[in-house]
Image (cartoon, rainbow, N blue to C red):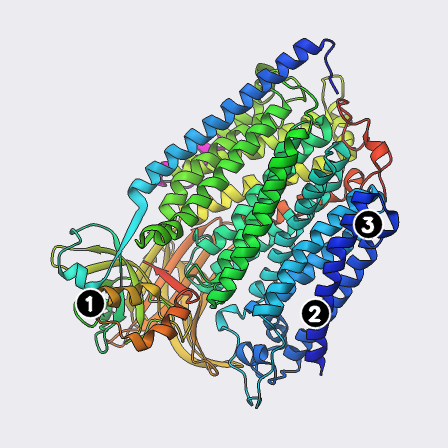
Amino acid sequence: MSTTTTGLSSARRRKKTRLYLVLGGLGCLALATLLMLAAFRDNIVFFFGPSEVVEGKVATGQTFRLGGLVKDGSVDRPGAADEGAVWFTVTDNAQDVRVRFAGLLPDLFREGQGVVALGALNDEGVFLADEVLARHDETYMPPEAVEAMKRAGTWKHTEEGAAEGGAGGAGYAPAAQ
Amino acid sequence: MIAELGHFALTLAAALALIQATVPMVGAARRDHAMMAVAAPAAIVQFLVLGLSFAALMHAYVTSDFSVKNVVLNSHSLKPMLYKISGTWGNHEGSLLLWVAVLALFGALVALFGRNLPPTLKARTLGVQALITLGFLAFMLLTSNPFERVFPPPLEGNDLNPLLQDPGLAFHPPMLYVGYVGLSIAFSFACAALIEGKVDAAWARWVRPWTLLAWIFLTAGIALGSWWAYYELGWGGFWYWDPVENASFMPWLAATALLHSAIVVEKRDTLKSWTILLAIIAFGLSLIGTFLVRSGVLTSVHAFAVDPDRGIFILLLLVLAIGGSLALYAWRAPGLKGGGLFRPVSREGALVMNNLLLSTAAATVFVGTLYPLFLEVVTGEKISVGPPYFNITFVPIMAVLVAALGVGAMLPWKRGDLPAVTRKLTAATIFTAGATAVAILFWTGESALAYAGLAFSFWLGAATMVHLWQRARPTKRVSVADGFRRMRDLPRAVWGMTLAHLGVAVLIFGATGASVMTKETIAAGVPGDSFTVGDYRFTLDRVEQVPGPNYRAERGTFRVYDAESGDFIADLASERRRYVASGQETTEAGIATDLGGDLYAVLGQPADDGGWSVRLYRKPLVPWLWIGSTLLVIGGFLSLSDRRLRVGAPTRSGAQEAPGADAPAGAAPEPAE
């Protein structure tokens, strides 16, 4: 197997090579850890329901995900007057949060149904959404919407079976701003 | 009747898999040739039986047999024929059936083309392959029978999710599956080699074509998926770092690393233990990908499996396959002897760096994808990790990889001379600087990131061409004309590598344009209104109602002009479709494309003031994404067609000379046909 003339130097070189490999591996590991920690610090997004938002658990300007139901009759589209933005209310059946989204809503966005939005609160307590996710399937509820109502205590146990089963499978269509 | 036949075939296949997984294994241990000989015919029959089962399901879809539950849930008699056929695998059960059918196909291919494999290795490889098949067949038969009947049969089906009705998506899953499942062969070979306790250059030469084949399809599948997301979803992006995308991207990264490390095993008889581990990891990541997508633990477009039992079953399969193979690795790998020596600055060293960086990239993607799941299981906290995480971790690692690739590919085996190689790359460096300067003048006012992305792509392209020229004209003694002649005669593997590396350069070019250089406008207006996007003016011309085969649509037509000169450039038609059967809505983007990039328009919802919301983009260089992906695939096929790597694989006696000898590519003795 050996390509060198003496066994000793071969063994030593093999050791040296292995040392370089280990050092290279450790270097990459350190690089990856550093990058991941740096990225995690700024890019982990927490989830809150409308009740928690109203209680003031979220600071103004902090990016988070808001989940709940789109309140019936709450969708306004002022049109060109407001740069084509859409306004709607996200509710957990206890508290409401008003949302402004300047973008195209996903195809399955409906009043009375589950929704998840990514964004931050402004000074007036309006949630400015950068992204809105709605279900990709007619029959399921986003797990975040269920979670929001559970946290608010408005989740009806009878709905549990149907929605829990569906939670994982519900697909989302993100609509980024 | 045909559905029952399909179900019966599935059961028969499970019985066959049980035989194929046990008899040859015992035979290999006892050196019993009769028992080992069971493997090949069993693998071939297994494929035929599963093919029959798949054909039976497809028949139910094509004839719209609504007495089969799966067809009722996922098809509709009005659907165009292409989507009736693709509906076969556009659902949980059908896609699993496709998965096992491909698994069996690869087993059959090894049985057919692996005539030169040592009998014990072949028997064990097919045995491991059958074990995987058995696991998935058990999963199907116990939790996901595609042939379940309903009584009374309804008159009409529920329709396939309209988003999935797209030619790109019709072929995306089968491609991806051939890729995912193709990695099973590398895995089976690795496990078989561990059981044998022997890994040599010949082993690497048998494994590499299979890995390459899987990699080609994985690449094509991912590219098609990206194409679909870009053109069909109408969100204007080509990559979202969606967990499901990551699920296919992680095995791709591992497979890419494996392709490169297998070269080192083949040529230099070293890095064996690592290569075996990579083969296990690559297929393990495929299985994890399947678990993520199929179990419904993720919330995403693709997750149409919604049964917790299924999730637990797949998780169990996952633990058995990955845990079992890693245990086998821990037990047997220390016995593998290392071979050729090398200095850190050498081709081997460069390939090790490639492997380290690709693995690191795969690890960061893995952590970003699974950490939220992990945290939710452990603490119940719901978090999400968005695209910025992946951009911050993945992009710098790739930047180092691309910068090093230009140099590393030029290094000779065993021991390299870095200053000498750097001198050879002077031309590439000058070209990079020049091209970047031109790009800065041509695309004024872009971000530094955009110019950096373009520079990296120029560098990789130039360095790859220099390398090719170096292979054709190694010294000044060869005349330039001779150099061109010799270039034609270079082995296909060299051309394959060149095209693949160029493909990466082109991909970076396209990705830079499609992400950081994109201009976007979101607005609202009535027909007649104009919107400015970068150097273009979009005018909403009209909005009208149009009927489709199984939907009704609102179509918005945009006229695009040059913002400065006012010249007419293109008409874009975007549609919002409502499907009759399911009531679902989808958006079709209007796109005009040329090599400079895409103009992209989406008609949104009507507003209260009678206007419409619209979303308009100028996305430079997008077509280069698809061109780059195509180059990768062509490069893969070229390399696969190299004499040396034909799927037939060489005999072991022929390969014994390879270790240590830096044989020129293509000169290996006795390639099997």
Q: Which residue is mark 2?
A: B11
Residue at 47%, 30% (x, y): give it: A28
Q: CA distance from mark 3 to mark 1?
A: 68 Å
The quadrant in which the N terminus of chain A is found is: top right
Residue at 43%, 76% (x, y): give it: B584
Alpha-carbon neighbours of circle 2 within 10 Å: few (<14), some, or many (≥20)? some
Tell whether B491 sits left or right of B511: right
Q: Which residue is mark 3?
A: B113
Q: Which residues are magenta?
A: B434-448
Question: Which subunit holds the residue at mark 2?
Answer: B
Alpha-carbon neighbours of circle 1 within 10 Å: few (<14), some, or many (≥20)? few
| Quarter where residue B606 is shown | bottom left
Query: Does residue B534 appear anywhere in the picture?
Result: no
Tell whether B296 sits left or right of A124: right
Question: Which numbered disc, 1 or 2, marks the residue closer to the eye?
Answer: 2
The picture places residue B541, in percent across and down from the top left corner, at 38, 71
Q: Is residue B369 above or below residue A154?
A: above
| Quarter where residue A57 is shown | bottom left
The picture places residue B83, in percent across and down from the top left corner, at 59, 73
Secondary structure under tag 2 reads: helix
Q: Which residue is mark 1?
A: A81
Asked whether disc 2 touches disc 3, contact meaning CB atoms under 8 Å apart, the reply is no
Q: Is residue B7 above or below residue B325?
A: below
Judge whether residue B646 is colored magenta.
no
The picture places residue B228, in percent across and down from the top left corner, at 52, 61
Decide whether the magenta segment is chiefly helix, strand or loop. helix
Question: Which subunit holds the residue at mark 3?
Answer: B
Residue at 72%, 77% (x, y): give it: B5
For this rendering, which residue is in front, B166 or B140?
B140
The picture places residue B458, in percent across and down from the top left corner, at 52, 34
